[in-house]
Amino acid sequence: MSENSDIIFYYFNLTGTDSYRELMEDRFRRTGSARKIDFREWNCYKDLPKTDGDLYAYDGVVLSSLAAKGFLRPVPDGVSVDGIFPWVTEKSRVGRRIYGFPIMLCSNALICRKKDDLHVRKITDLHENVAIPMRSMVMYYYLQTMCSNRDPVLRLKVMEHLLELIGGREFLERSSLEDYGGIGRFNRGECRYFLGFTESMRYFKPDDYAVCFANFSATGYGDKPLFMADFVSLGRRVPAEKLGDCLALMQILSGEEFVREVCTLDGQLQYFLPANERVFPFLAECDPLYERLYALLASGNNGLFRYGPRYYEDFNRQENVLLQFLWERAGWKM
């Protein structure tokens, strides 16, 4: 194997810009390595990757599945990244092993203008139209509702309430991420609240905003937010001569300096939620909102959104079963 062979990097949704890849290459070159990075797109939600990857970047919802199926190699003992929120590190273990470093976090957040803030912290306390990507996120909403409500009747109650908030059953098929137009509706003042990820805020009109992480409980209990996390991991078959470079790239991607630059890519605050807590003081200088976000993330009263080892066998199938149930038995007729 040539020492100059490419690092094969499978990724999904690296912020959606060429700037991210260019910045990644630049920081890697600063380590002194001339090894090329071969970027290969992969939709981690739909398909398993190929097995020739040296590095994989993905949503942690599939972490357990990738590890169980032998795609990932545990991080060697003694290799770490300074500044990662401790609760994220602990809750991203598979068994007792660390299989990757977290890069960014995200969670379903209720966002409104401060002047419109009703101090609502529970989805079921809202009784007005809300911009919600219901059709695209229905399985994630249901799983979070399951974690927040033991009673199946209460789970259905929350799901029905979400449906009311988008305007009723007739709006379900038009509430996908692609066509529900939630950002436009929110910017035009057609609704006071937006349910989505904080990174959508870079498209909001300039204003002072209030953000809280959504509570899907019907009773007020189960108030632990669930966070999705983007990870970078070693491939199972990384050759020995590439291992050092791959570990260096993992540390770059999760490290304070790189993440700080990613959060202000193209000269614009992106409103990402870094997994590295050391980035927050810098972001708070750009927007004081980050002081509040840091307090919520640093509390440790948070969970990590992960599915089990059978994600690829079960998740999409169960989403279809859920929709069929909601359509036929719960009356969500199209």
Image: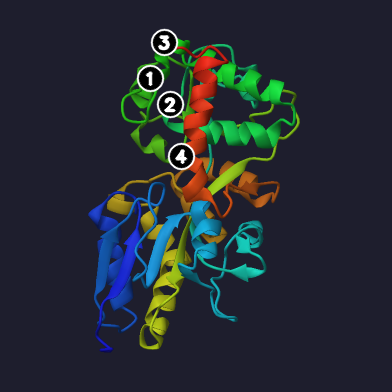
Crowding at dot 4, Cα within 10 Å, few <14 / some 14-19 / many 20+, comes out as some
Amino acid type assigned to the residue bearing label 2 in the image: Arg
What whole-number distance in Å separates the C-alpha atoms at marks 3 and 2? 12 Å
Quarter of the figure with residue 26: bottom left
Q: x%, y% of residue 283?
A: 47, 51
Amino acid type assigned to the residue bearing label 1 in the image: Glu
Q: Are marks 1 and 2 in contact (CB under 8 Å)?
A: yes
Label ID, residue 135? 2
Of marks 1 and 4, the one in the foreground: 4
Label ID, residue 173? 1
Left or right of 64 on screen, residue 153: right
In the foreground, 115 or 74: 74
Crowding at dot 3, Cα within 10 Å, few <14 / some 14-19 / many 20+, comes out as few
Please tell me which residue is depicted at 53% across the width and 71% down the height of the picture: 81
Please tell me which residue is depicted at 34% across the width and 81% down the height of the picture: 31
Q: Which residue is mark 3?
A: 170
Comes first in the chain, label 3 or label 4: 3
